[in-house]
Image: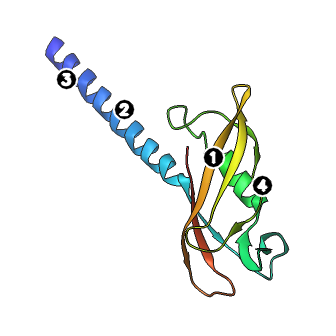
Amino acid sequence: MQRGFLVGAVGGAVTVAAVTGVVTWLCAAKDLQHTTVDPVAQGLYVKADGRLAVAHTILEARIQGWYHPLPWLGREIHDVSCPSHLKAVVGAAETCTARSDGGRISIPVRVIDVEGDPAKPRVTWKFDR
């Protein structure tokens, strides 16, 4: 009887650990974001130094929403602010800031990839926790 309980308890613990690991992996993957810069859509069309760019408001909203999806992935933040738009150029980078635990933290953001139609590129960007 005790052996069956022990096997069930260990099996349950392993299952919980596996599910937690998968959820963590899925949420951590959200550090990588995709944004299509669409010149037709009013809110998504901005330029920085004459080049298409991801609007700073999009950066701020995505970082705010995904920085702290689970307590062990990142700190709880608020008041995210990005100084400028992120150019749709591989390697372009900005440093956004946010409030956390009464202080300001820096959140580096960089473009990883730009693909598709140059007039309406799909920009893949990443923020660091």
Q: Residues within 10 Å of mark 2 (few under 14, many from 20)?
A: few
Task: Give the numbered dot on residue 83.
Answer: 4
Nearest to the observer: residue 6 or residue 127: 127
Q: Which residue is mark 3?
A: 7
Is residue 10 at least partly visible in the picture?
yes
Is residue 1 at least partly visible in the picture?
no
Which percent across, then down, holds residue 93?
A: 62, 61
User: CB atoms at circles 1 and 3 under 8 Å apart?
Assistant: no
The answer to which of marks 4 and 2 sits earlier in the sequence is 2
Q: Amino acid at mark 2?
A: Val
In front: label 3 or label 2: 2
Q: Quadrant of the C terminus?
A: top right
Q: Amino acid at mark 1?
A: Ile
Quarter occupied by residue 114: bottom right
The answer to which of marks 1 and 2 sits earlier in the sequence is 2
Which percent across, then down, holds residue 42?
A: 85, 74
Q: Amino acid at mark 4?
A: Pro
Q: Amino acid at mark 3?
A: Val
Q: Residues within 10 Å of mark 3 (few under 14, many from 20)?
A: few
* Residue at 69% over, 87% down: 119
* Residue at 49% over, 47% down: 28
In front: label 1 or label 3: 1
Task: Give the numbered dot on residue 48.
Answer: none
Q: CA distance from mark 1 to mark 3?
A: 45 Å
Q: CA distance from mark 4 to mark 3?
A: 55 Å
In front: label 4 or label 3: 4
User: CB atoms at circles 3 and 2 under 8 Å apart?
Assistant: no
Q: Residues within 10 Å of mark 4 (few under 14, many from 20)?
A: few
Q: Is residue 13 above or below residue 50?
A: above
Q: Is residue 13 above or below residue 38?
A: above
Q: Which residue ends up furthest to the front in the rendered image? A: 49
